[in-house]
Amino acid sequence: MNVRKNKTTEKRTAWLMELGRELRAEYEDFVRTSPLSPRLAALVHELESSVQPSRQQRSGVGETRP
């Protein structure tokens, strides 16, 4: 029974991964062909600016080693 459960889980995971790839491709096509409004572009820029310091903290950028 455990083997059957693993195969079902593997199929479900593969299906979800493929769905994610398709959605990402569709989104990237949409972004390339649809320009953002100035207001939305400003909000995206603001969001990206606020997220970058968090990413640097997690990756250890700017830290010095003893």
Image (cartoon, rainbow, N blue to C red):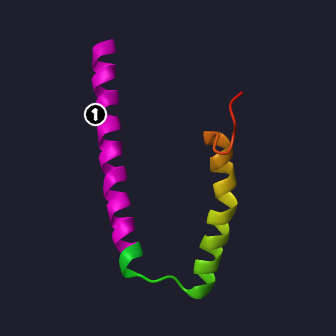
Q: Judge the density around disc 1: few (<14), some (14-19), many (≥20) Cα neighbours within 10 Å.
A: few
Residue drawn at x 35%, y 36% as measured from the top left: 13
Residue 59 in percent (x, y) is at 60, 41
Quadrant occupied by the C terminus: top right
Mark 1 = which residue? Answer: 11
Q: Residue furthest front?
A: 66
37 is higher (above) or lower (below) than 15: below
Dividing the picture into quarters, in which one does residue 31 lie?
bottom left
Quadrant occupied by the N terminus: top left
**Residues in magenta, as a range:** 1-30
Q: Residue furthest top?
A: 1
Q: Is 29 colored magenta in this rendering?
A: yes
Of 33 and 55, which appears nearest the observer? 55
Residue 9 in percent (x, y) is at 35, 28
Amino acid type, mark 1: Lys
Residue drawn at x 34%, y 66% as measured from the top left: 26
Residue drawn at x 31%, y 29% as measured from the top left: 10
Instruction: Please name the predominant secondary structure of the magenta segment in the image.
Output: helix
